[in-house]
Image: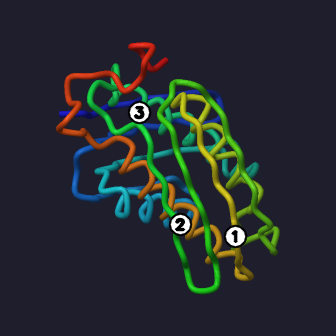
Amino acid sequence: MRTAQISRTTNETAITLSLNLDGSGASDIQTGVGFLDHMLTLFAKHGRFDLALCCKGDTVVDDHHSVEDIGIALGEAFCSALGEKRGITRYGSEMLPMDEALVLCAVDLSGRSCLRYSAQIPSQKIGSFDTELIREFFLAFTRKAGVTLHLRQLDGENSHHIAEAMFKAFGRALSQAVKIDPQYQDEIPSTKGVLE
């Protein structure tokens, strides 16, 4: 089973996380940041990842530390659960509509960290959530997971719809990339022989 357990404690956050790449989309998300709970629940459901996550953070300051550290912990979990990445499809992409919003997400589990993020989210806040933290989450994830991630907003006017399309597309693209390809289940999908 491709699973990971992560425990991360700093002066700003305490996080416990469990991940099963070959799950059913079940989740128990308690980040202390309501909007992020919603986004990660969607991510797990659409990616078919089982994800349990608890974060106790200094949200009395703001949500930044929690959001960033959760991205770090989730990236570590994916890196750990994938191991040497033998047999994976490696690449995944999704173009996902959410009402008027349209988002393109493409991922390469290359071992190299790269985020290309292009979004014009109209509002600075969704409820009490700072929309600039969406990029911070994905940046933290890509750095720790060692993946190349392209997220591009192609259309959209409603900030919630744009964010939701991003997290759903991210889940679906990542789900494609981590799948085991039966034709190549004993191979590393790289001419280098390693993905790191």
Q: Which residue is mark 2?
A: 95
Instruction: Name the foreground residue: 134 vs 96.
Output: 96
As measured in the structure, the alpha-carbon distance from the residue carrying label 2 to the one carrying label 3 is 25 Å
What is the quadrant of the N terminus in the image?
top left
Q: Which residue is mark 3?
A: 77
Query: Left of 117 or right of it: where is 140?
Result: left
Disc 3: CA contacts within 10 A as few (<14), some (14-19) or many (>=20): many
Q: Are marks 1 and 2 in contact (CB under 8 Å)?
A: yes
Residue at the spot x=48%, y=64% of the render?
168
| Residue 110 vertical position relative to residue 108 in the rendered view, above or below | above
Q: Secondary structure at mark 3?
A: helix
Residue at the spot x=53%, y=61% of the render?
167
In primary-sequence order, the first of circles 1 and 3 is: 3
In percent of width and height, residue 190 lies at 42, 22
Instruction: Name the foreground residue: 17 vs 154.
Output: 154
Disc 2: CA contacts within 10 A as few (<14), some (14-19) or many (>=20): many
In primary-sequence order, the first of circles 2 and 3 is: 3
In percent of width and height, residue 13 lies at 59, 37
Q: Secondary structure at mark 2?
A: strand
Q: Which residue is mark 1?
A: 154
Residue at the spot x=37%, y=27% of the render?
189
| Residue 156 vertical position relative to residue 20 in the rendered view, above or below | below
Judging from the image, the colouring scheme is rainbow
